[in-house]
Every structure is written in structure tokens, then in C-alpha cells.
Image (cartoon, helix red, strand yellow):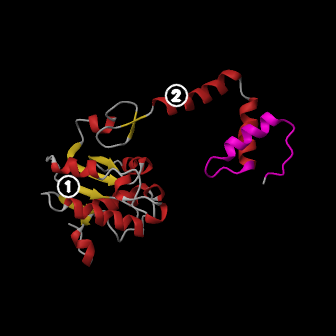
Amino acid sequence: MNHDHYPSKLLETATSEFASLPGIGRKTALRLVLHLLKQDLADVERFSSSLLQLKKEIRHCSYCHNISDTETCSICLDSKRDNSLVCVVENIRDVMSVENTRQYPGLYHVLGGIISPMDGTGPGDLNILSLEEKVAGGGIREVILALSTTMEGDTTNFYIYRKLNKYPVKISTIARGVSIGDELEYADEVTLGRSIANRTLFESSFNNGKAY
């Protein structure tokens, strides 16, 4: 419960809204609100309108489910990308992490989460069917599974493998021996780039196969 004394109900309400954001405590929230109070009205209006515009106009790419300003994202539209190579990631932050390595030439497929019975997330809640349809349609030579190295990530990897291994496509996974942490966004760019470059065939990961 909040026991701080606020001289203004408006200040308290704005602080509470900022404090509802992940990783933002009430002290940080108050500091942010007081900072905005010092700004010109035009600056604050620009700040708030950018959030409203984001919420109202943001879209998801119809092909890879990445966040986009248009129906098809800029990555999928880039003719220089290898559209026969698809990297499967959990979320938008992971796309940004892999892109920051500047070493991955292919496209993405964003699942929108991982299979987690504890959280009530099953395969039907994720973008797995559209991935299978993409592979079944032909033209994809390799699918790279780049999910977190957790039990849920492993479960999701195996589920996708079982769905795709009937198709003539190579299924690989990022190098398990490289310490990338539980989430790709926390990996440094060099390490993450290396883990993708040193990926292994998914079947080989069952018995510690070597990278190809």
C-alpha cells in the first residue's frame, strides 16, 4: 500500500500510472512525472501522442508476426534477405536482439510466447500453425529454433520439431554450449551471433551433436 503523502491528487494519479509499468517503482515514477511537469506543454503532448499513436496504429506483420507500421514488415519486404531461412523466436524483443548482431541474413517467425502450462499457454495460443503452413508451402530450406534455454523453451522446441520434421526442411537450434542466458535480449551481440552461426541440427541436440 502507498503511504506517501502527495500534495496533489493529479500528481498521485500520474505517479501511480507510471508505477504500474514493469520495473518502475514509485520513487522512479515520481521522478519521471516531476520531470514531465518541468517540460513545455508541447513536449508533453508529443510524448503522450506518440504513445496513443503507437497503441492505435501499430500492426503485426501478416507473414512473420513482427511488430510493424505496415501489413508486411520491413524485414520481410527486404529483397536482400534470405527468405528460405526462418529464425523462430519467442517475442519482438528477440527479433531486435538477433537483428542487433547484424549477422543473421534470413527472416523471422515470432511465436508470441512459449508453451507454458503453468501460465495456461498452450500450442494453440501461439503462432505455430502459421509456421507449419509457411513450411508446408515450400521454399524454406531451414528453420532455426532460437528460443530460451528453459524447460518451457525446450518443450516448445520439441513440439515445433514434431510438427515440422515431416517436411523436407532442415531444423536447427542455436548452440547450446554458448551461455546466452534464459532470454535472448540479455545476451551480448557477439555471443548471440556466435550461437546462431554455430547452430546444430535439432536431432543432434538430443545426443550432443556437433555443429555443422
Q: Amino acid at mark 1?
A: Glu
Name the residue located 41 percent from the left edge and 54 percent from the top edge: 113
Whole-percent x and y of residue 169? 16, 57
Q: Which residues are magenta?
A: 2-26
Quadrant of the frame with the N terminus: bottom right
| Residue indicated by mark 2 | 53
**Residue at (27%, 60%) from the top-left corner?**
160
- Can residue 10 be spotted in the picture? yes
Pair 2/1: label in front: 2
Q: Which residue is mark 1?
A: 142
Q: Residue at x 33, y 35 (%)?
A: 74
Q: Secondary structure at mark 2?
A: helix
Q: Quadrant of residue 32?
A: top right
- Which secondary structure, mark 1? strand
Tell me the number on the disc at residue 20: none
**Mark 1, other Cα within 10 Å: few <14 / some 14–19 / many ≥20:** some
Q: Quadrant of residue 13?
A: top right
Q: Is residue 149 visible?
A: no
Relative to 121, say whether 140 is above or below.
Answer: above
Q: Position of residue 49 (x, y in %)?
A: 58, 26
Confirm whether the magenta stretch covers residue 18: yes
Q: Amino acid at mark 2?
A: Gln
Q: Does 211 sit above or below residue 109?
A: below
In the image, taking residue 177 as reference, residue 203 lies left or right, namely: left
Is 137 included in the stretch rendered in magenta?
A: no
